[in-house]
Amino acid sequence: MISQTLYWYLGMRGLANFAMSLHFAIYTTFLLSRGLNLFEANLVNLVFYATLFVFELPTGAFADVFGRKTSVVISGVFNTAGTLAYFFAKSFWGFAAAESLLAVGSTFLSGAFAAWAVDRMRHFGHDGNTKNLFIKEQQVVVGVSIAGGLLGSLIATKSLSLTWLTSSAVFLFWTALAFLGLREEYFKRQKLSFRAGFAALKQTTRASIEFGIRHRTVRFILLIGGLQYLCLMPGNMQWQPWFGQFFHSVSSNGWLWVGMSAVILAGSSAAKTILSRFAGEDRALFYTQMLLGISLAGTVAFKALPLSLAVFMVHEFGRGLFKPIKDAYLNDQLPAKERATVVSFEAISHHLGGGLGLVLSGWTALAFGIPATWLVFGLVLSFGSAAIYRFSRP
């Protein structure tokens, strides 16, 4: 059952990421083609982060109270609706509505699915740490992203919006698999009235917030993760127009995405080896964060494609390295009863940082250009991470 849980988790994670990755290589290009500018494209994503902020904790508590499988299935319904809404959208407000649906779907999944996997494996006797689980997850997610991003860019040569219809069909299939295939033997559903259920949600949310605030490891991850999401938004949203100046076809974005994903995969594969060379996960996370900041700033320091691209790939390697170390570090510290809610609480720091980063980087890029934006945000990430490590590490 432990192996079965592992295969289901990795397979479902991979399929969900494949559905979303169909538009990863063309997302900003798609929004710009619909008449939006860089700042407006960022504002569409701001709707996503604002919705995440509102729904993250309640949906995490929902999973802890009513079951992780129920939460996962609901996430599939919202993701199917959100990608379909993108296919039909024609304006800023249409894209914003689609993003809000995808955000709700993301919150129902974010803490619940990892909690399902960890708790089910431990229910059947797994007593080790979770590093291998999250390293494998990162490898699977990035691996399928290579195929999804490339396929999406090829579909986009026929129609940019067709990628969203394809994504919606995959999510519909994913939802059916979750409903029919996931098992939750460890979970005992409580017979709650609406009022009692709401009270249980409040109690679980309150306990999780208190745990997150007083626990030094969780607090460190909250701070360093929030800063990362704030400062990496320029790279997330502007790599397509930055490297687009060197290319002449949207399909080139797909091949660039393949390279980026392969390097992220290499980073995640190296996580276990690199972690063994550091005295603790906190130190490994700090140095990885410094690498991210320096390479983000360094990418725009070169006007020649080979040098700029090489430095950017170092940045992507750091992305692949960071996530599995952080996920394992966090989940190994958490109580099972409140795991999904605390993971959702941790995600809130990402939403706050990401939302602020979208506004600031979008405005800065529009006013001063992409190179100045990446330079400033990279330096802020480096110096800010040094301050957090100095004063808030466990």
Image: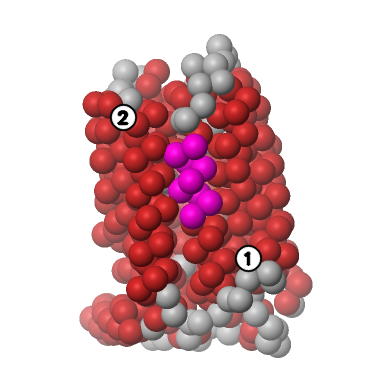
Task: Where is residue 324? Give x, y as percent.
Answer: 60, 63
- Is residue 214 inside the magenta stretch? no
Q: Residue at x 63, y 65 (%)?
A: 134
Which residue is nearer to you in this view: 388 or 201? 388
Task: Where is residue 380? Give x, y as percent.
Answer: 35, 49
- Is residue 294 inside the magenta stretch? yes
Q: In terms of secondary structure, where does tag 2 sit?
A: helix
Q: Amino acid at mark 1?
A: Phe
Q: Amino acid at mark 2?
A: Ala
Q: In terms of secondary structure, where does tag 1 sit?
A: helix
Residue 184, by quadrant, is: bottom right
Q: Residue furthest top?
A: 248
Quadrant location of the N terminus in the rendered image: bottom right
Looking at marks 2 and 1 on the same chain, the residue that comes earlier in the sequence is marked by 1
Taking the image as shown, residue 144 lies to the left or right of residue 85, namely right
Magenta segment's dominant SS is helix
Q: Which mark is residue 365?
A: 2
Q: Which residue is mark 1?
A: 134
Taking the image as shown, residue 161 lies to the left or right of residue 19, namely left
Task: Report the magenta residues as a range.
Answer: 290-298
Task: Where is residue 279? Give x, y as percent.
Answer: 61, 76
Q: Is residue 98 above or below residue 278?
A: above
